[in-house]
Amino acid sequence: MSNPNGMVSLVNFLGDEKIKFQVVHQSATNVTTKSGGVARVTLETEAGNISPADLLTGKPTRYGLLLWVDSDDFNSWMQHRGDSRGGEG
């Protein structure tokens, strides 16, 4: 059932120490819904994660990947690892 090209494969290849974790709903500063069921999200992140040059050159120094999971599953994972804050902190 494991996807050799999936997120788990990437994490296993790189190791946890090379991956930064950022919760989108805690970083978002604006969300608007557009026609066609599209949401536009503006978020803040550390300046070292992305720069205007990354977009202009098409050669990013880091890749930001969005991973969407159900909130109940995320909160269960947080509780499993001993973090009682869940997705709220």
Image (cartoon, rainbow, N blue to C red):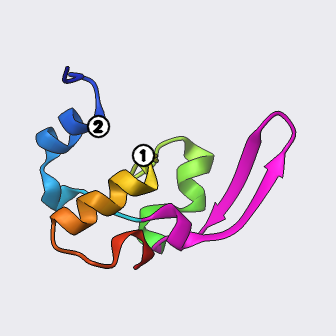
Q: Is residue 44 left or right of residue 78?
A: right
SS for dot 1: loop
Residue at the image point whose x is 77% and y is 38% from the top: 37
Answer few, some or many: residues within 10 Å of disc 1's Cα (few below 14, many 20 plus, some between 14 and 19): few
Against 25, residue 3 (above or below) is above
Tags 2 and 1 touching, CB below 8 Å: yes
What residue sits right under mark 1 in the picture?
Answer: 67
Residue 61 visible within the image: yes
Q: For the C terminus, which image quadrant?
A: bottom left
Query: Which numbered disc, 2 or 1, marks the residue that appears first in the sequence?
Result: 2
Find the residue positioned furthest to the right: 35
Rendered location of residue 19, percent (x, y): 25, 57
Where on the picture, by quarter, is residue 51? Answer: bottom right
Q: How far apart are marks 2 and 1 (CA)?
A: 8 Å
Residue at the image point whose x is 73% and y is 52% from the top: 40
Residue at the image point whose x is 42% and y is 46% from the top: 67
Query: What amino acid type is highlighted by mark number 1?
Result: Leu
Rendered location of residue 63, percent (x, y): 41, 48
Rendered location of residue 13, percent (x, y): 13, 39
Instruction: Give the number of the disc on residue 7.
Output: 2
Against 33, residue 1 (above or below) is above
Query: What amino acid type is highlighted by mark number 2?
Result: Met
Q: Is-magenta flag for residue 31?
A: yes
In front here: 70 or 50? 70
Residue 44 visible within the image: no
Against 35, residue 50 (above or below) is below
Q: Give the range drawn in magenta.
A: 23-46
Q: In this view, does 15 lie to the left or right of 56?
A: left
